[in-house]
Every structure is written in structure tokens, then in C-alpha cells.
Amino acid sequence: MLRIANTENGQVRGLPAADPRITSFKGIPFAAPPVGENRWRAPQPAENWEGVRDCFEFAPISVQDTPGLGDDIYCREWHVDPDIPMGEDCLYLNVWTNAKSANERKPVLVWFFGGAFQWGYTAEMEFDGERLARRDIVVVTVNYRLGALGFLCHPQLTKEQPDAPCNFGCLDQQAGLRWVRRNIANFGGDPDNITIAGQSAGGGSVMAQMACMDNEGDFKKVVVMSGMFGSPYTVNDFFLPQSVEQAEKKGERLFEYLGVKTLEEARKLDADYIRSKYSELRNNGEMFFTIVQDGHFCTQDPMAAFRNGTRIRVPVMAGNTGDEFIEYIHAADEDELSEKAEEYFGGRAEEFFSFPEARVRNDSGYSPISSPELGVKKAFLGDNGQNAPENCYYYRFISDIPGEDAPGTFHSVDLWFFFETLAKCSRPYEGRHYDLARQMCDYWANFIKTGDPNGFDINGNKLHEWKPYTDNERNEMLFTSDGAKASTEQSGFVRFLLDTMK
């Protein structure tokens, strides 16, 4: 087994994973610590080391609110350890490989975690890369800066470093990806067969990397999980880039809240002090959440780039869970509903009301519809209208999820299944759930290898055919309690909303 590997900065030693045929390397530096003068700068090259560096444990997580202190679903699900090491020195990545030598050229997955660009880390239980590595994939999970330390924008930064004034967390991801390109062959990976993938803000990160044309050639496929959004009712600004001017104003308010006037003073502050003060400001609505259109890393809206064909053109797998991010028409009664339908759909309002779903009402509003489902499908239809469209595969995760809290298919629950890490979860999953997880991981592995999810499962059985989603063939893959089921779009309501979305 490949327990020692070379990198551009020195040798690293890994450990056998739970399956000794897999080696895990944890805490490999891919950039210099972003501390002191490197705070709020693009990632700088890592320093060399002598001898063999033991890479046995995850590096400290990015500075963020302490995990595991609450009783929300995510603290119960995987943010379970309030004592997990945390620090500003956080630019490390992790590798799982089943290669026996450095010349095997296996397909590579590069994973960006989610968490609204405020929370999250590669050490989360569900991101264990072992099951994918068993399928002959080299798995890399990349850490990046978060919150005020990762996404600050300020006039003094713009003046001091105009080529990289902001978007530091995204630049960390890009640096991690480029490290993989330069080094992954030493771990048995193929630098010319890389897939980048992420979920939630990680999915938004993948969209941003795909819209950055400087990344052309650095990856061959992408997976976007719950990271594309659209609304037929209002402007949906999830991951919509801010202007530099908008973002700089937030940065100025943060400096004021921190009690500093200059960048030099801010770089001398304790990172935990910045974290605590930023958390207070964020809880009052001043959140560094979206990428900034800085003219360098980000030159365009990633969703628009997908729809109009100006993204890096590669095959895509994308989808959502059934119960996440539902959009509504907020109306007090049917009269107001009719007024808003006229506003949203104009001369097609009567057609809107021909669908029974239009008058469905619950405590949140009328006409519920999945924002990520519409976002993905609208993007896919845009790509399908281009010359030589890429294959785009849509999925929806709608399995039952056990537990006394009856959570439904909540945002992020599918991560346990795609990584096939259900055994680490405290929920009382049963055999059918494990069968579904195996199928989902198999489809994902096939896509990572070839850009096509079809083929055989890990046991050699042929998987149900999953066709691309196109204008002519609205194909879907449904991940249900009874396994993976190929389907076509059944809802005329969804088609109507896709047709009328601006």
C-alpha cells in the first residue's frame, strides 16, 4: 500500500484507514498559514520540510462558531465535538487512496464542504472518503477560510492588493485544486481526470470555480449538490455575487465594530476576537455570505454563466433533496394570491391557476415549489440550448429519513448517502437505506470516473439507466426509499414555472 508519498514541499506519511487497503493522509499543507501579514491575502506557497511529515490527524478547522454547542439538527447530526481543534492556520487538505504505487492514475474527486461560508470543515463525519476510495477513486477534501476571515472585502484591501482583494475562501479552494493538479499523481491519482464537487455553499463554490475561466483545464466534471437556486416568484439572491462597493461597505462596518481604522491594526487582532465580534454583527444581518464580483476571480454571476454557456463547459451532475428551500407566494388570502399571480405571471396567471398546486396552502404560504429543483433545471435547460451541450444529470433525493424528529429530507441529509457513511450516523437506518447509499455512491463514482453515472455497481450489477435532463427529455433520477428510480418530469406545474421564470 502507498503509505508514503512525495509532495512538492516534502514527503508525507499516511495511515491505514478502517479498511487497510486504503491509506488516509490527513492535514497536508497546501498553502502557507494565512496568519499575520498573510491574513486577508490570497494563499501563499507552503514552506518545505525535512524528512517525512506524519499526516495522521485532521488539521485545525477554520475559525468559526464553536461546533456542537446547540441542539439544532446539525449539532445532533454531525457537529458533535465542541473540543475539535480550531485555528487560523487551517489551509490543509486530506487524501484517501487505495493506490499501491504512484503510477496508477486513478480518477480524482476534490470536495468542497458547505456551511453558508460560515461553518463547516473537512473533519465532519459524513465526509470520510474511504468508501469512494474503495471504488478506485482518489478522494481529496480541501479546507478553506470562512466568515470574516475568508470573505472580507474592504477599500484598503482593494487598494493594497487589487489583483486579489477578496474572495479568499474561494482562492483557498482554487489553490487546493491546483495543488492537486501538481501533486496528486504521487498518490496514484490522475491530474487530468479531476472532478470538483460540493454541497450547499460547497455547491455554490463549485459554481463559482466553474465560472472562473482561469480554471479552464483544471477539472473535467463537476457535481453541484443543493447549490443552484431559482424562484418563479421573487428574485432569489442565493450566491448572487455582490459588487465590490456593496461588499466594501460591510467591511467598513466590521472594522468599525472591531474598533480599528487600518488594515494593519486589523491584521494584529486576535482571530478569536474577530470571530466573536463578527458573530455578533452577523446575527444582526451583516453576513459575509456571497462571493464578490471582483473582476479577477469572479467576473460574472455563476448561475447566469451556466445558463448562457460562458462557464467552463464540462459534464454536470446536480440536484437537491425533496424538502429543502421551498419557495412560496406569501399572500394573506386568495384575493392577494390572485394579485400576486398577475404580478408574477401577467397574461399567464389564469394558466397558473389551472394547476392544483397553485392553490396549495400551508403555514408558510401558497404554491410551494423547490427552489433548488427549479434552479438546477433552469440552468440545465440553458446549457441544453447551447451549441454542443454538455450532458447534465439531474437527481432528487426523496427517501424516508428515520428518527423521532421526523426530519424529512432536510438540507444536507443526502451527504450520508453519497459518501456511503451511514454507519457513522446516529439515526436508526435500516437495510434499504444502506442499499440506497450503495447505489448513490456507485452512480457518483461512475460519474467521477467517466462523466457518465451509468454502468455497474460495486458488486457488478447493472444500474438503472440515468439519462441526461434536456429540453426534449426531462429525465430525472429519483433516490427513494425503494432505491434509485429513473423517471421523467411528471409535473406540469414545474414545467410552467420553468417556462415563466425570469
Image (spheres, helix red, strand yellow):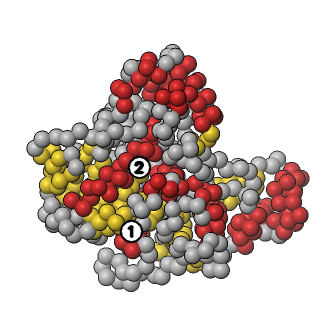
- Dividing the picture into quarters, in which one does residue 382 lie? bottom right
Is 44 situated above or below 127?
above
For the point 60% across and 51% down, the residue is 300
Does residue 300 appear to the left or right of 327 in the view shown?
left
SS at mark 1 in the image:
helix
Crowding at mark 1 (Cα within 10 Å: few <14, some 14-19, many 20+) = many
Is 325 situated above or below 71?
below
For the point 48% across and 28% down, the residue is 160
Q: How far apart are marks 2 and 1 (CA)?
A: 19 Å
Q: Can residue 280 be seen in this view?
A: no
SS at mark 2 in the image:
helix
Residue most toward the left?
51
Q: Mark 1 — residue?
A: 448
Residue 117 in the image, given as x and y percentages of width and height: 48, 42
Q: Mark 2 — residue?
A: 174
Is 279 situated above or below 110?
above
Q: Earlier in the sequence, mark 2 or mark 1?
A: 2
- Dividing the picture into quarters, in which one does residue 442 lie? bottom left
Q: Can residue 229 be seen in this view?
A: yes
Q: Which of marks 2 and 1 is in front?
A: 2
Q: Quadrant of the C terminus?
A: bottom right
